[in-house]
Image (cartoon, helix red, strand yellow):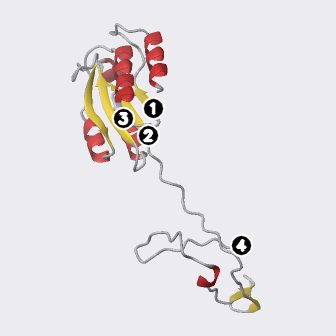
Amino acid sequence: EISVSPLDANGQLITGGVAANDFRFNPLGVELASTPGVLVTMAAAAVHRIEIIPPAAPSAGSRTVLALDSSGSMSGNDPGRLRVTAARDLVARLGAMDEAAIIDFGAGSSGGLRASRLLQSFTRDHALLDLAIDQIQANGGTPLYDALLDAVELLRAAPGPAPRQLVVLTDGEDTASGSRPDDVVAAATAAGA
């Protein structure tokens, strides 16, 4: 059995109008690896049946909110800004159809968010996402749970059926939220995130 992927002049897969007699194989020479150039036998191949399996449809992509801690504690707990490096690595791994939004928390709020700044709305543009990540600072308290509610709301409001995920990079201690962990879990469950 031999698998082939016939392409047209533009490099697109040909998925229709192809028959077995459209293919021809040249004779195959078989040689021992220990004696290159010395043919042991000749073989031939013929096409008896053809089955074209088109590639799977491209994924609709996913939506990710990346929430980065910009609270003052990060200056001591992450002096090397490893969270920025990790965020950039995540962006680099996003697929062509994946979208991400960047928020930070601890440095104020914007755009009607409880405790976060929306640094970049959903986009597939990696350069824009990286620019937003580069804005991360370290000052203020840590409204972690309120920021998670902001992130969940962004995911809930995003159109379409794409899978949704939330990635949080923090030192983990909430010092300034009015919300509780149970509030975040309930909101995420309701949003399907």
Label ID, residue 165: 1
Q: Can you see residue 141?
A: yes
Q: Of the residues tagged 3 and 2, which is closer to the observer?
A: 3
Q: CA distance from mark 3 to mark 2?
A: 11 Å
Which residue, given by chain and number where applicable, does mark 4 sit on? 1
> How far apart are the alpha carbons under marks 1 and 3?
14 Å
Amino acid beneath label 2: Ser
Q: Nearer the viewer, residue 39 or 82?
A: 39
Real-space Cα distance between discs 4 and 2?
A: 36 Å
Q: Which mark is residue 6?
A: none
Check disc 3 and report the residue beneath it. Answer: 159
Q: Mark 3 or mark 1, which is nearer the start of the sequence?
A: 3
Q: Which residue is mark 2?
A: 62
Q: Give the residue at x 33% y 22%.
A: 74
Kind of residue indicated by mark 3? Pro
**From mark 3 to mark 4, how far is it between C-alphas?**
44 Å
Asked if marks 1 and 2 touch (Cβ < 8 Å), the reply is yes
Quick check: 183 left or right of 36? left
Q: Nearer the viewer, residue 123 or 168?
A: 123
Q: Mark 1 near mark 3, Cβ–Cβ under 8 Å?
A: no
